[in-house]
Image (cartoon, rainbow, N blue to C red):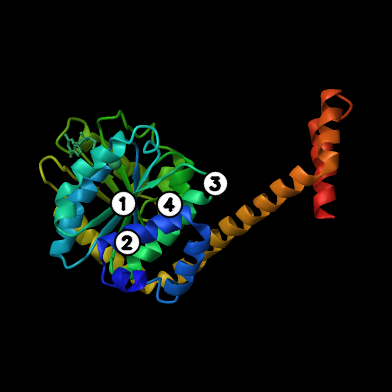
Amino acid sequence: MLLDDLKKGKRGAIAKAISIIENDEEEARKLIKKIFKTSGKSIIIGITGPAGAGKSSLINKTSVALKKLGLKTAVLAVDPTSHITGGAILGDRVRMTESTDSGVYIRSIASRGATGAVSHSIRNSIRVLEYAGFNPIMIESVGAGQTEVEIANIADITVVVFNPNTGDSIQTIKAGQTEIGDIYLINKSDLDGATQLYESVKEFIGMTERNPIILQTSVKKNRGIDEFAKKLKELMKQKMTSKKEQEIKQFESEIKDIVLNNVRLRIDALLESDKNYSKYLKMLQSRNMDPFEVADKISRGIFK
Ligand SMILES: Nc1nc2c(ncn2[C@@H]2O[C@H](COP(=O)(O)OP(=O)(O)O)[C@@H](O)[C@H]2O)c(=O)[nH]1
Ligand SMILES: [Mg+2]
């Protein structure tokens, strides 16, 4: 029933399935078992960059442009602020109304939770969206260290968005960002300093062997969006042919996440039930052992 509706792309079914992915481990497993076989055909586009760079605004316009090129886009917004006020999500919704009207599916994913939990939600929500017929699937995430790397492990195409407004300059661009992008967008090209930033990004990143695409866009003036959409479509075609190789790496990082999580749960349980554990903690308090010694002793006990 749910599966039939999902296949038809019904919004209620998609929302329900993603809620299951996020909240119900047991049901999620059953669902994934059913839809995994046919998965792996949609291209995943990660859109990352600092808060306020214009990612949501860009995605809104770009997904409409992609629709004109015959592509049905879905968006997952990974929002670290969503659980604090909800304001950011609302803001994103307002900024992305045009795209929703044109049939784009947008969903926020909370980025709280244990390490790996966000990736778990994203990877499996992608499978749901893919089953519902979307391609590409865009993931919006604030480029904040960890998630940035996680997104690059999941996405087939990574787009890094900069803008001249938040004081992005070549000095403030982090090393990680220069390595992950297939496309770099200098957004807000209507503002002062955009061209300068564009030139320095071109010099700094464009000359590397990877030869990424570097574009200027302005959502406000509606400039560069169609070009961006066209480039995306071209890249999607290329990535489709190399998806099989790419996929191995993505599976590798997914499995590592799951196994690490399983191991962590097991170890948490082991420590809790270990009578020596509290004994060791007392040894620390009395300063009879140091933390390294204690950790070594406990680890040896676990891995023996
Ligand atoms: N001047 C200008 N403002 C923009 C442009 N694109 C987005 N903005 C504004 O920048 C702010 C942040 O945009 P948003 O899409 O929420 O950024 P996000 O945090 O990266 O998702 C909003 O007030 C947008 O209206 C642009 O091209 N030019
Ligand atoms: Mg946003």
Residue 233, how many percent across, how many down? 24, 64
Residue located 15% across and 65% down the image:
69
The amino acid beneath tag 2 is Ile
Q: CA distance from mark 3 to mark 1?
A: 21 Å
Rounded to the nearest whole Å, what is the CA distance between mark 1 and mark 2?
10 Å
Contact between marks 1 and 2 (CB within 8 A): the answer is yes
What secondary structure is found at the residue carrying circle 2? helix
In this rendering, the label closer to the viewer, 1 or 4: 1
Q: Image quadrant of ligand 2?
A: top left
Q: Nearer the viewer, residue 158 or 281?
A: 281
Tag shown at residue 151:
4
Residue 94: mark: none
Q: Give the label, 2 or 3, closer to the camera.
A: 2
Can you tell which of label 3 and label 1 is closer to the viewer? 1
Q: Nearer the viewer, residue 158 or 102?
A: 102
Decide: marks 3, 4 in contact (CB < 8 A)? no
From this viewpoint, which residue is outermost toward the right?
A: 288
The answer to whether residue 105 shows anywhere in this view is yes
- Kind of residue at badge 1: Arg
According to the image, label 3 marks what residue? 115
Residue at the disc numbered 2? 14
Q: Earlier in the sequence, mark 1 or mark 4?
A: 1
Horizontally, residue 41 falls left or right of residue 119, namely left
The amino acid sitting under disc 4 is Ile
Q: Amino acid at mark 3?
A: Thr
> Does residue 270 appear to the left or right of 223 in the view shown?
right
Q: Which residue is mark 1?
A: 107
- The x, y position of residue 3, in whole percent, is 36, 72
Question: Mark 1 or mark 2: which comes first in sequence?
Answer: 2
- Counting from the top left corner in percent of width and height, residue 48 is at 35, 46
The CA distance from mark 1 to mark 4 is 16 Å
